């Protein structure tokens, strides 16, 4: 059957730790998050948490001085951090590799991650030309550090999905890399067909890095003169 109940999940994680199958750091990470979400959100099952947030979601907000920045919706971040422990440059640790999760939970989580990569789904929201122009304008106003956040966000979703599919012990991560390349290609095709090619540019940092390189070249030419 697999685990869906949050309290049972915490007990199972603690048992894995006592058996020496996971480290104290990993056990504390997942138990603390499960405990927090159970108390703060007043939910009992893992499926409830995902169901409340249909897909991963980021927005572009404007702060002081009109500067734009990437902002991940709070509940979206909660779901990602609940099921995946970030390890920096390494693959994240997936809760489902520690305890056996209910199939419904896994299916909902897969959908959550995959939809997040493609969000916003243009046909679903009936976007028109003004909406696309507004989205394009916002992306092109993002400074380099925020573009890097967008790049990392897409990578995190794709990497998490590949870990779910192939597990943390996939030899040399060959299958994971192949699957990630397929997801990334599908994402690019989706964006090009909308057309939202500017999001591919944002991911690749093409426009902004190209502009910065042009400025550097101009400065160097001026110094030579």
Image (spheres, helix red, strand yellow):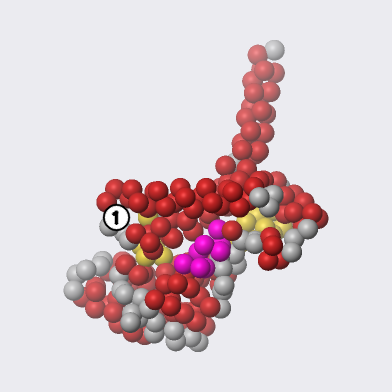
Q: Is residue 24 rendered to the left or right of residue 85?
A: left
Q: Which residue is mark 1?
A: 170
Question: Residue farthest to the top?
Answer: 225
Residue 195 percent across, percent down from the top left: 69, 49
Describe the element under mark 1 as helix, strand or loop. Answer: loop
Residue 191 percent across, percent down from the top left: 63, 51
Q: Quadrant of the N terminus?
A: bottom left
Q: Is residue 225 visible?
A: yes
Q: Quadrant of the C terminus?
A: top right
Residue 140 percent across, percent down from the top left: 70, 46
Q: Name the residue rendered at 18%, 74% in the picture.
A: 19
- Judging depth in this view, the residue of 124 and 90 nearest the camera is 124
Q: Name the residue rendered at 59%, 49% in the picture.
A: 189
Check residue 115 for magenta coloring: yes
Image quadrant assignment for residue 218: top right
Q: Residues within 10 Å of mark 1 (few under 14, many from 20)?
A: few
| Above/below status of 128 relative to 188 | below
Question: Residue farthest to the right?
Answer: 130
Check residue 82 for magenta coloring: no
Residue 77 percent across, percent down from the top left: 52, 67
Image quadrant assignment for residue 120: bottom right
Q: Name the residue rendered at 39%, 84% in the picture.
A: 5
Question: Residue farthest to the left?
Answer: 19
Q: Provide the major secondary structure of the magenta segment.
A: helix
Q: Is residue 153 rendered to the left or right of residue 121?
A: left
Query: Which stretch did the figure color magenta?
Result: 110-117
């Amino acid at each position: 059957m697999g685990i869906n109940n949050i309290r049972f999940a915490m007990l199972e994680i603690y048992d894995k730790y006592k058996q020496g199958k996971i480290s104290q750091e990993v056990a504390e990470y997942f138990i603390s998050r499960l405990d927090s979400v159970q108390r703060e959100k007043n939910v009992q099952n893992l499926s409830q948490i995902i169901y409340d947030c249909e897909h991963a979601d980021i927005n572009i907000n404007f702060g002081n001085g009109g500067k734009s920045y990437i902002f991940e919706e709070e509940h979206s971040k909660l779901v990602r951090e609940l099921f995946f422990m970030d390890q920096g440059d390494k693959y994240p640790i997936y809760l489902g590799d520690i305890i056996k999760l209910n199939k419904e939970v896994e299916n909902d989580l897969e959908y959550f991650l995959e939809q997040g990569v493609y969000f916003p789904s243009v046909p679903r929201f009936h976007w028109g030309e003004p909406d696309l122009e507004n989205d394009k304008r916002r992306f092109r106003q993002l400074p380099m550090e925020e573009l890097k956040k967008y790049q990392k966000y897409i990578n995190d979703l794709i990497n998490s999905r590949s870990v779910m599919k192939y597990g943390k012990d996939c030899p040399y991560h060959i299958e994971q890399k192949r699957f990630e390349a397929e997801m990334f290609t599908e994402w690019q095709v989706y964006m090009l067909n909308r057309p939202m090619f500017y999001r591919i540019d944002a991911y690749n940092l093409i426009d902004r890095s190209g502009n910065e390189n042009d400025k550097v070249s101009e400065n160097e030419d001026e110094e030579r003169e």
